[in-house]
Amino acid sequence: MRLIGARQAWHDAFHDSTPSALAVAADKATLGKRGRVANETFPSRQETNGRCAHMLASGLVQSAIATLPKPLQHFGHALYSPVGNGQDLNIAHALVWFTTEMQAMSPRRQAVAYWMAMAAFNSHRGMVWGGEGWGPGRVCMFVQDWYGYRVDASNWSRDWAVVWETLAKTIDELDAKALRPVAAVVKQHKAA
């Protein structure tokens, strides 16, 4: 595993690129192989030094992640881990919602902002993996799909722009906190 950046390191620390035994058996069955063939090579079984180096680097990164508070670990897993699950996403959403300092709002507006927090998280996740951030139209569609309330995109700058910017700022801050110990491992590895 090459330690290039904190986001990549978080992802690769939980990713095993070697094929499973079942995948190897399925490939052999597809090719019609039975048993071993003379002079056949098994590169993943021969190259153990690279596997050990990957496991060492993964362990260093996973150990750094374990120093974070649990909610931040879930936040990072929801953004970067290939084994992130629904629990990670739910906790990340709750962390964003309860960390964001909002102005006083009516209950209806607060409910819409709650689902905008999930949209902002999904937008951020897309951006860190090379996609584009969500615009007002997509956010309004998301809120309508998840909450059933129609938000008018034509009044976005007046009604929702400040809420969206506040959520995005909170997510950026949480992302930086979550990546800090992993970035330290990457920096230390590059210096060595």
Image (cartoon, rainbow, N blue to C red):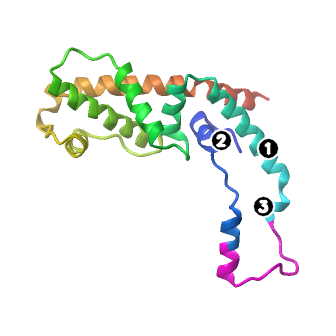
Q: Which residue is mark 1?
A: 53
Q: Are marks 2 and 1 in contact (CB under 8 Å)?
A: no
Magenta region, residue range: 26-42
Q: Percent position (x, y) of residue 186?
A: 68, 31
Q: Residues within 10 Å of mark 1 (few under 14, many from 20)?
A: few
Q: Which residue is mark 2?
A: 13
Q: Secondary structure at mark 1?
A: helix
Classify 99 as above or below 147: above
Classify 64 as above or below 149: above
Q: In front here: 175 or 149?
A: 149
Helix, strand or loop for the magenta stretch, by majority? loop
Q: Residue at x 48, y 32 (%)?
A: 75
**Amino acid beneath label 2:** Ala
Q: Secondary structure at mark 3?
A: helix
Q: Residue at x 66, y 27 (%)?
A: 64
Quarter-of-image position of residue 158? top left
Q: Secondary structure at mark 2?
A: helix
Residue 10: mark: none
Q: CA separation, marks 3 and 1?
A: 14 Å
The quarter of the rendered structure image containing the C terminus is top right
In the image: residue 114, left or right of residue 7: left
Q: Which residue is mark 3?
A: 44
Q: Residue at x 41, y 43 (%)?
A: 126
